[in-house]
Amino acid sequence: MKRRLLLLMPLAIFLLLLVFFYDGLKLDPSLVSSPLIGKPAPQFALTELYDPSVTISNADMKGEVWLLNVWASWCVSCRAEHPVLVDLARQRVVPVYGLNYKDQREDAIGWLKAFGNPYVSSLHDLDGRVGMDYGVYGVPETYVIDRQGIIRYKQIGPVTAKVLNENILPLVQQLKEERPS
């Protein structure tokens, strides 16, 4: 009896692991919370994608609500979200800044010329250090940053029309209505 129980133990452990694995498949990776929510956005100073002689820092955006969209020309999901960002840029509801992540400058510029440029400015993060400071898991990722430079929302994965209309735009509107401190 004991011997039979010992033989069934590995099978029981395997089945338990299988249940946990199956349950994990139902989780939405875009719902992973960020430890940066509610904290100041990491400082950066990067060259502008189109003009490497221009350096832009997040201090330049202080006083306005803005989005930081992390993207790359090699990113398939970035291409899926791009029409949503182009449409958002046309509406001029909130400035969108790009963080071109681990990408060659020429490839990124060619990609924006081919698909449209929704960014007020796109910053070139060739080595990915700024992306790492922001806790980027992979591209695309989008951050809503308030007037004081605090990260208020993080979207992991593509921004869809649904995410934009249900999560991002209402938050942007709320942040714009708040009195500056």
Image (cartoon, rainbow, N blue to C red):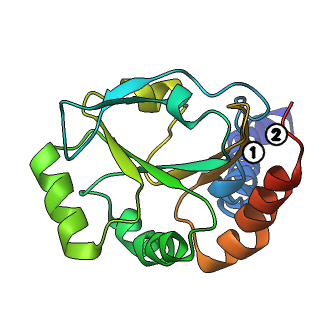
Q: Pointer 1: residues within 10 angstroms few (<14), some, or many (20+)?
A: few
Judging from the image, what secondary structure is the residue with disc 2 in? helix
**As drawn, 62 above or below 73:** above
Q: Which residue is mark 2?
A: 5
Q: Position of residue 162 (x, y in %)?
A: 68, 78
Instruction: Say whether residue 121 is left or right of residue 12.
Output: left
Q: Which mark is residue 8?
A: 1
Q: Are marks 2 and 1 in contact (CB under 8 Å)?
A: yes
At horizontal 51% and vertical 32% (from top left) the residue drawn is 60
Q: Position of residue 31 (x, y in %)?
A: 72, 53
Number of numbered tags placed on the structure image:
2
Q: Position of residue 109 (x, y in %)?
A: 18, 56
Quadrant for the N terminus in the image: top right
* The quadrant where residue 22 appears: bottom right
Q: Residue furthest left?
A: 106
The amino acid pointed to by label 1 is Leu
Q: Position of residue 51 (x, y in %)?
A: 19, 40
Instruction: Say whether residue 55 is left or right of residue 135.
Output: left
Judging from the image, what secondary structure is the residue with disc 1 in? helix
Foreground residue among 138 and 67: 67
At horizontal 75% and vertical 57% (from top left) the residue drawn is 172
* The quadrant where residue 105 appears: top left
**As drawn, 164 above or below 60:** below
